[in-house]
Image (cartoon, rainbow, N blue to C red):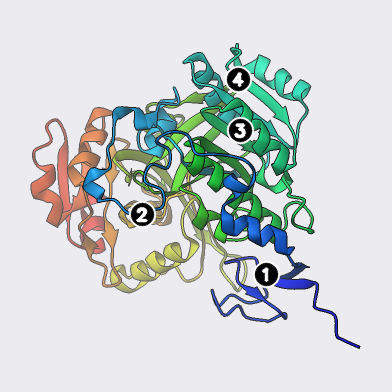
């Protein structure tokens, strides 16, 4: 009797690698324990994917959307116009996306549950529909009545915005082909399914198949599509990692649910910078832009308190002043406790080791807590000098001047190294009323041109300690 073909296949959740059997380590991405078993995709689905989902579903590219399909053209022959981007009506989001929505693009928006992803996209839909742009909002999680209730809180919507509560990609693609909207929002990718795939919605196969279908629709019809994606406990979008490789732009919506502060961060952007951030405040009527985040971050800063210093980080082209707080105290246990919020925990341990070795400070028997206020996460090494001064201030009990800003990268030898765009950072500090700025000595020539602020150059952490305390 002939042996029946295996009806299941194994997928790597991280990179999408396929295998006929389970393996402990993925040969593609070298990650461990990422394989999951799912039903094998039917042959008709593979044929449809090979022919192009948009064509198989009856969709045809609009004029100019796929001009030159099937033949190569010189890149100099491709014409661009100002109409290739559409503004969202939200300045902070346009900044992160590189100036607006690119026609025919596929954008993934990820974030924790309840952080405000759907609210943000609903506000974008409201602004676009008010500007005469046709929008289709597809929801697989809420009913039309629930979306209308949330929309009433945000504002008035025009008839240019359409709602579709559906999870079947075939029905959704048919509606897109019929209505031909300019922008489509899919909320969320984990609830969508294709009958051609036998696994449950949200599985590796389903997410990859649905994303491929939406990509064909976006490129074939020139429609801009936003995909909402849930995140795992590690903070990455649930589903295969290949999802982020397939889309054009990946945006993460971050923040503490107990705080009104939200940050929209670009992780991948084929049409702009990935260093920009957008800052929002969650209110009863929706999300409000924070046009001056430095002032917002420094509200309520304590005066004449030890362990507090202001530093400057550069997010894309925007300087951002943040308060760094530190609490250093003798431990009552054999093993000191160390904790970092908003910055890298290992970086804090490294800087404390530098203080032990280069400044002679005995911190080995002390508990240490470092916090970046406002709930923002910063990984730029330019705030190293600020963290060093905050730790020294708390350890010695001596407060730093309230009108002082410090920034610079600290090396393992205790040297304070140059940072990029020091002039922009110092100018932002002067604009907000700070009188003194502590910078790496190599940046003195850049910052000396800033008027109305005293500049202190330091070459190592010992010199910074002597000049600031």
Label 3, label 1: how many angstroms apart (C-alpha)?
31 Å
Q: Is residue 280 above or below residue 426?
A: above
**Nearer to the camera, 233 or 195:** 195
Residue indicated by mark 1:
11
Residue 139 horizontal/vertical position (percent):
70, 33
Dot 2 and dot 1 residues touching (CB under 8 Å): no
Label 3 or label 1, whichever lies nearer to me, is 3
4 or 2: mark nearer the eye: 4
- The answer to whether the residues at label 3 and label 1 have Cβ atoms under 8 Å apart is no
According to the picture, the residue beneath numbered tag 3 turns out to be: 177
Q: Residue 257: x and y, percent?
A: 63, 38
Question: Which residue was labeled with disc 4?
Answer: 161
Sequence order check, earlier mark of 3 and 2: 3
- As drawn, the residue found furthest toward the right would be 1
Label 2: which residue? 380
Q: Earlier in the sequence, mark 2 or mark 1?
A: 1
Looking at the rendered structure, the secondary structure element under dot 1 is: strand
Q: Residue at x 70, y 48 (%)?
A: 190
Secondary structure of residue under mark 2:
loop
Q: In the image, what residue occupies the spot 62% across and 46% down?
A: 229
Q: Position of residue 360 (x, y in %)?
A: 32, 70
């Amino acid at each position: 009797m002939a042996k029946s073909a295996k009806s299941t296949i194994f997928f790597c959740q991280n990179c999408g690698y396929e295998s006929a059997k389970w393996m402990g380590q993925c040969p593609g991405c070298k990650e461990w324990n990422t394989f999951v078993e799912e039903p094998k995709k039917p042959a008709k689905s593979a044929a449809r994917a090979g022919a192009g989902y948009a064509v198989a579903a009856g969709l045809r590219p609009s004029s100019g959307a796929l001009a030159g399909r099937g033949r190569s053209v010189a890149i100099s022959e491709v014409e661009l116009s100002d109409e290739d981007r559409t503004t969202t009506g939200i300045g902070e989001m346009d900044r992160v996306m590189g100036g607006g929505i690119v026609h025919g693009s596929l954008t993934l928006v990820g974030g924790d549950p309840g952080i405000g992803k759907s609210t943000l996209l609903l506000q974008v839909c409201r602004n676009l529909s008010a500007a005469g742009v046709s929008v289709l909002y597809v929801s697989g999680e809420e009913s039309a009545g629930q979306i209308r209730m949330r929309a009433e809180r945000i504002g008035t919507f025009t008839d240019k915005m359409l709602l579709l509560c559906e999870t079947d990609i075939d029905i959704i693609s048919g509606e897109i082909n019929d209505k031909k909207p300019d922008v489509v929002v899919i909320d969320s990718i984990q609830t969508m399914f294709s009958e051609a795939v036998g696994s449950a919605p949200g599985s590796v196969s389903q997410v990859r198949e649905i994303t491929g279908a939406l990509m064909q629709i976006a490129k074939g019809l020139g429609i801009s599509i936003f995909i909402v994606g849930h995140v795992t406990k590690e903070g990455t979008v649930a589903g295969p990692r290949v999802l982020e490789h397939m889309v054009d732009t990946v945006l993460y919506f971050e923040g503490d649910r107990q705080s009104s502060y939200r940050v929209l961060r670009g992780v991948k952007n084929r049409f702009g910078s990935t260093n920009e951030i957008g800052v929002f405040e969650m209110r009863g009527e929706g999300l409000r832009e924070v046009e001056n985040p430095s002032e917002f971050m420094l509200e309520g800063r304590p005066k004449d308190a030890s362990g507090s210093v202001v530093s400057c980080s550069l997010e894309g082209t925007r300087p951002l002043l943040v308060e760094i707080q530190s609490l250093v105290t003798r431990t009552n246990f054999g093993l000191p406790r160390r904790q970092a919020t908003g910055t890298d925990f290992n970086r804090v341990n490294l800087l404390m080791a530098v203080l032990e070795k280069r400044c002679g400070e005995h911190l080995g028997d002390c508990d240490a807590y470092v916090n970046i206020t406002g709930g923002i996460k910063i990984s730029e090494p330019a705030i190293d000098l600020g963290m060093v001064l905050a730790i020294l201030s708390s350890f010695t009990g001596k407060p730093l001047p309230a009108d002082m800003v410090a920034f610079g990268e600290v090396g393992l030898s205790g040297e304070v190294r140059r940072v990029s765009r020091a002039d922009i950072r110092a100018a932002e500090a002067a604009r907000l009323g700070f009188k003194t700025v502590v910078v790496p000595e190599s940046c003195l020539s850049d910052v000396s041109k800033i008027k109305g602020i005293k500049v202190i150059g330091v070459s190592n952490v010992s010199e910074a300690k002597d000049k600031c305390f």
